[in-house]
Image (tube, rainbow, N blue to C red):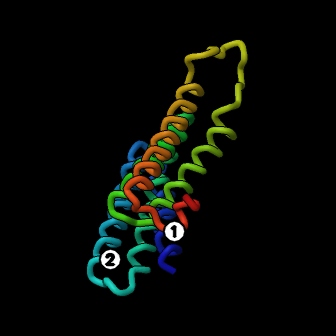
Amino acid sequence: LLALNAAWFYGWSYFLLVNDYEPYLGLFTALLAAVYVFLASVALTTKETDRSLGIFLGAIALVFLTLVFPVQFSDHWVTMAWAIEAADILYVGFLIGKRELRYSAFAVFGISVVRLLAEDTAIFNVADHVALFNARMMAYLVVIASAIIMQGLYVRARDQGILSDGENNGS
């Protein structure tokens, strides 16, 4: 019900604002994500025994944060933003010690890889295509760099012994 409420509110707000305030919809989405981050932090600090509400509110905030990029940007910028966001989420997941946040980083990274391969790889006009230094190459470089950063974060966490059993992969 909580997720349905958030989706319903955002859907109607988007529908009402898109014609007159389209340049600001990314900001609106980011502010809505901030509201849910605040609600999650309040829920996590006030109810320390049952953390499910706080985690669920944080997941809603993460969904809104992920939606900021396709709402505000277009083309390859969305892919690059999602890849960078995945690395940021993973870093924060290690920083605050939340395994669920680290797992969600891989979901966001997976979405960026799928979008990279499905959307950003196509060449529509070969005659106007720049062979090497183009937006596609930049998107690939950012996604690869994010993967390397994420791998480095996991190696550092493994060396420090802070991985959970499911993340340790038997090593």
**Residue at horizontal 44%, vertical 55%?**
158
| Residue 44 marker | 2
**Residue at horizontal 47%, vertical 46%?**
150
| Residue 98 sits in quarter | bottom left
Vertical arrangement, residue 110 with respect to residue 103, above or below: above
- In front here: 8 or 37? 37
Q: Residue furthest front?
A: 171
Q: Quadrant of the C terminus?
A: bottom right
Vertical arrangement, residue 72 with respect to residue 96, above or below: above
- In front here: 109 or 118? 109
**Mark 1 to mark 2: distance in Å?**
24 Å
Dot 2 amino acid type:
Leu
Badge 2, how many Cα within 10 Å: few under 14, some, many 20+?
some
Secondary structure at numbered mark 1 = loop
| Residue 165 marker | 1
Residue 73 in view: no
Residue 164 in view: yes
Q: Nearer the viewer, mark 1 or mark 2?
A: 1
Q: Position of residue 99 (x, y in %)?
A: 45, 66
- Total numbered labels: 2
**Residue at horizontal 67%, vertical 39%?**
117
| Residue 4 marker | none
In this picture, residue 107 sits left or right of residue 159:
right
Q: Residue furthest bottom?
A: 49
Secondary structure at numbered mark 2 = helix
In this picture, residue 10 sits left or right of residue 113:
left
